[in-house]
Image (tube, grey):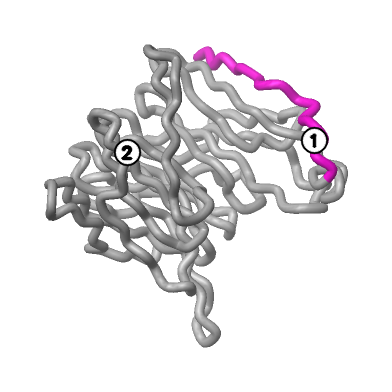
Amino acid sequence: LWDLRARRSLALTTPDEILNVTYSPDGNFLLINDKSETVRLIDVRNNKNHIMASNSFDQQYWVNEVVWTAKGDGVLMCAGRQASSVQEKGMLELIAVNTAEGAAELRSVLSIVAHTANCTAIAMDPQNRHFVTGAYDASACIWDAQELCCLRQCCTSLEEGIGNLGFSFDGSFVAGVCEVEGRNTTARKLIDISAVSTGETVLKIDSKAYARRLAWHPRQCVMAYGGEKLQDESYRDRGSKSEVPVTVVTLQAK
C-alpha cells in the first residue's frame, strides 16, 4: 500500500498470489481476490491493514474481477464455473459486505448465469447506472445496476474472449478489448467502443499491439490503453519488454 502524501509504503502479507485489488467507494477498505479462489476484505483505515473477512469458493469456481456497488455495501464479481458433468458457465455473483467491527462478513447472496463461458471482465459505470461483463465466449453485456438484469449486448465486433472493459466518464460509452492467448498471433488487434444506450459499435480502433488494459479520463472522452506485441509464447517467457508504450486516444463527435 502506497501513501502518496508521506511517500512511503506499507506491506501486507496475504495467503496466496493476488489477482485483483479494488478500493471501496469511501476508500476505507480493500477487496482482493487470489489464486485460491478466495475474496478477502481488508481494513486500511489508520494503517490497520488487516484482513477482516474472507469468502472461499470451491475449486470448480474461477474467481475473476470484482467491482463495488455504489453504496459500498456489496460487490459484484465475475467468475466461471465448471464441473466434469456440467458445461462451463460464466457467473455473476453478488456478495454482501458487512464492515462492522467484530461482525465483518463477505456473504454470497445471488448467483446469476451471465455467459456461456468463463466470465472474465467487469466494469461499473461511474454514474452507477450500469455495469458491463465480458467472457471467453467473446460476448459482452450491459446490465442495469439496480435491477441486476441484462439489457443488451455490446462490443460485438470483438471475436476473441473479452479481456478488459471500461466506461467513459459520463457512462455514455463502453470500450472493450480481447484477451489474446498464447500463439494466436493472427487475432485482430482491435478496440471496440460501443454506445451504452444501444449497444451498437460506434468506433473500431485498430491498435498496433494487443491491448491488455484500458482506462478512461475522469472528465473527458479520452482513453488510454497499453499492450504488447507477441510473436509467440516464448517471446513473453523470455521477459522481453513491451515494444508498445501507453497510447492515448481522443474521441470527438462529428
| Residue 122 at x, y percent in the picture | 44, 46
Q: Which residues are magenta?
A: 238-254
Distance Cα–Cα, label 2 vs label 1: 38 Å
Rendered residue at 32%/61% (across/down): 55
Q: Quadrant of residue 31?
A: top left
Residue type at mark 2 is Asn
Residue, disc 1: 229
Please tell me whether residue 245 belongs to the stretch shown in magenta.
yes
The kind of secondary structure the magenta stretch mainly shows is loop
Q: Element type at marker 2?
A: loop
Residue, disc 2: 49
| Residue 247 at x, y percent in the picture | 66, 20
- Which is more foreground, mark 2 or mark 1? 2
Can see residue 167?
A: yes
- The N terminus lies in quadrant: top left
Residue type at mark 1 is Lys
Rendered residue at 42%/73% (across/down): 58
Figure check: 83 above or below 173: below
Of callouts 2 and 1, the N-terminal one: 2
Instruction: Report the number of discs.
Output: 2
Q: Element type at marker 1?
A: loop
Figure check: 127 above or below 16: above
